[in-house]
Amino acid sequence: MRKMSLKKTEIENDENLYSGEIQELEEDFWSELLQLFYNNEYSKGERKVILERWAKMLSTKGTERWDHAELLDDARRLILRLYKITNETNEELLLDCLACLIVKDKFTVEQLNDFLKKYQFQYYYTTNGEWKLLRNNCVDRKEMVFISHSYEDREYVYKLVEFLEDIGLKSEQIVCSSIPKYAAPCEDIYDFLKSCFRECDLSVIYVLSENYYKSVACLNEMGATWILPKKYTSILLPGFVFEQKKGAVNPIKKGIKLDESDDKIKYRLKQFIASLQAEFALKALPDREWQRYVETFISKIKNMNASSSKEEQMFRSDYANNLF
């Protein structure tokens, strides 16, 4: 990260700014950080929350009053302290403080990233609350989705891939071994995955089921994504419950359970779509359009589940008849 400067001041400690004395910051990074904080349309309550979080991270006093001018004084004081501490240690604390600015929406994230880009940061922030490292100070690493699943569950995976296509992902951005169009271009899937993990920003979708945990190949894939930490989403197939999650995935982290209520599935899928849109720079979908894709996907899954249940009932009935 580029070295940043702040005009020398005579302030000895944080108490001075509580008296109303306002020190002018240089017209560079730190003054623009102040503008980024104050020009966003935060309410006074939101500003106070941000400043309290900054103060906690910086081990100093938070805000005492609610007037806009007083909150601005406190912002100047905390930014000055942040400048001093960051230059004495490292940039991790600065990144944590910057993340506190995100209390709004995608627009705020874009503003923050434009600000970081201007000052040649090696990181940028995503709408799902993660810092991502830029390679060679640019974001030209190919973004890809890898769908880790059991071949036995391929029918569900077909529907998932259709859904990803509907919301805007391109064929070259999806890796899925069960579908020839999306399969790895070489015979050794593990060599291909190692290359993807090393050279791409890879997001992993785990399609979890009993079949998944019976597959050695699937468990190897899960282990690979754990060794090289990647973003992941868990999709639980009908009949599989959160308590059955194990291995390298966090059992506490909620996933998308495909036999929950429609409202819960829609809510989870909406979050999923938003994260993919931010990560892959997909075109924003009108509400009606994404709702149509989500409802179509849910309908296909329900029909598959109903067919599977019917086949299972027929099998049990035939089996019982053959006993007598």
Image: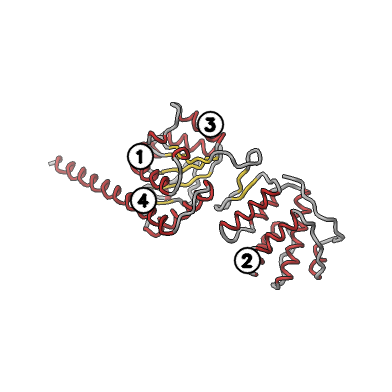
Please provide percent x and percent y for residue 90. 73, 47
**Image quarter of residue 71:** bottom right
**Tag count:** 4
Sequence-earlier tag: 2 or 3: 2
Sequence-earlier tag: 4 or 3: 3
Residue depicted at x 69% and y 59%: 54
Q: Amino acid at mark 2?
A: Tyr
Q: State the separation of the CA atoms marked 1 and 2.
A: 47 Å
Q: State the separation of the CA atoms marked 4 and 3.
A: 31 Å
1 or 4: mark nearer the eye:
4
| 106 is higher (above) or lower (below) than 203 | below
- For label 1, the residue is 154
- For label 3, the residue is 195
Q: Amino acid at mark 1?
A: Arg
Sequence-earlier tag: 1 or 2: 2
Please provide percent x and percent y for residue 137. 66, 41
- For label 4, the residue is 297
Residue depicted at x 85% and y 56%: 8
Q: State the separation of the CA atoms marked 2 and 3.
A: 43 Å
Which quarter of the rendered picture does the C terminus lie within?
A: top left
1 or 2: mark nearer the eye:
2
